[in-house]
Image (cartoon, rainbow, N blue to C red):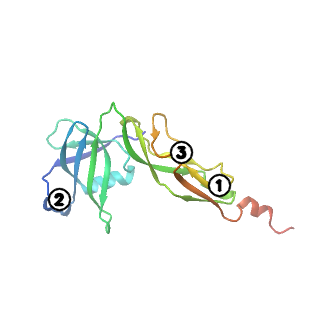
Amino acid sequence: MNAVMQLEATPRGTGSRASRRLRQAGFVPGIIYGPGVEPLAVSVRSTQLERLVGRQGRGHLIHVQVEGEANPRQVVIKQLQRDILTQQVTHVDFLQVDMNRTITLTVPIVVVGEEQARRRGLLIAHELDEVEVECRPTEIPEAVTLDVSGLTEPGPVTAASLSAPPGVRVLEDPDTVVVSCTVIGGGEEEEASTGPAA
């Protein structure tokens, strides 16, 4: 389970001109919303947000302390918009969560065992890098895993083979291809056994 991160936010005005001024000053405009929550336009420091996302990714529970409010809000990042050229974050959507109810969010897929597959002459091509899951905010995983160490034949490996921690449900169609496995002309073990005779 991810640790809880801290982020400071300030209520902001709306409109494209106001958002542009915020970005020029080093802030990212955003919004906090959720079931039963009045949407609140906010801004956060670009450097703080980028550091948080770069270190932990999007699938993370965050305590956002809004200026003027007594208690922090529990949120997750629902969407990030980036500039197509600079890749800097231009807008962020925060989903405020109920700690006692499940939420849906996107987390990375980590593939393990690729070296073992390669030694058998199999090349792993990644087709899906992240997946939507459902869980309680306190059970958000760092990632879900796919173990390809036992592969012996080429072919697709689907979302049905993904492994998630207890309390986490993968919402992806089980038939969705996560990785494709192809032959690369024999593995290291085969090359060693077919080498020149002494």
Of label 3 and label 1, which has the lower sequence position?
A: 1
Residue 189 in percent (x, y) is at 74, 59
* Figure disc tally: 3
Q: CA distance from mark 3 to mark 1?
A: 17 Å
Question: At numbered mark 3, what does the secondary structure look like: helix, strand or loop?
Answer: loop
Residue 90 in percent (x, y) is at 26, 59
How crowded pointer 3 is (Cα within 10 Å; few <14, some 14-19, many 20+) is rated as some
Dot in front, 3 or 1: 3
Residue 152 in percent (x, y) is at 69, 52
Residue 141 in percent (x, y) is at 44, 41
Say which amino acid is labelled 2. Answer: Ser
Viewport quadrant of the N terminus = top left
Residue that carries the numbered disc 1 in the rendered image: 117
Say which amino acid is labelled 1. Answer: Ala
Residue that carries the numbered disc 3 in the rendered image: 162
Q: Nearer the viewer, residue 61 or 132?
A: 132
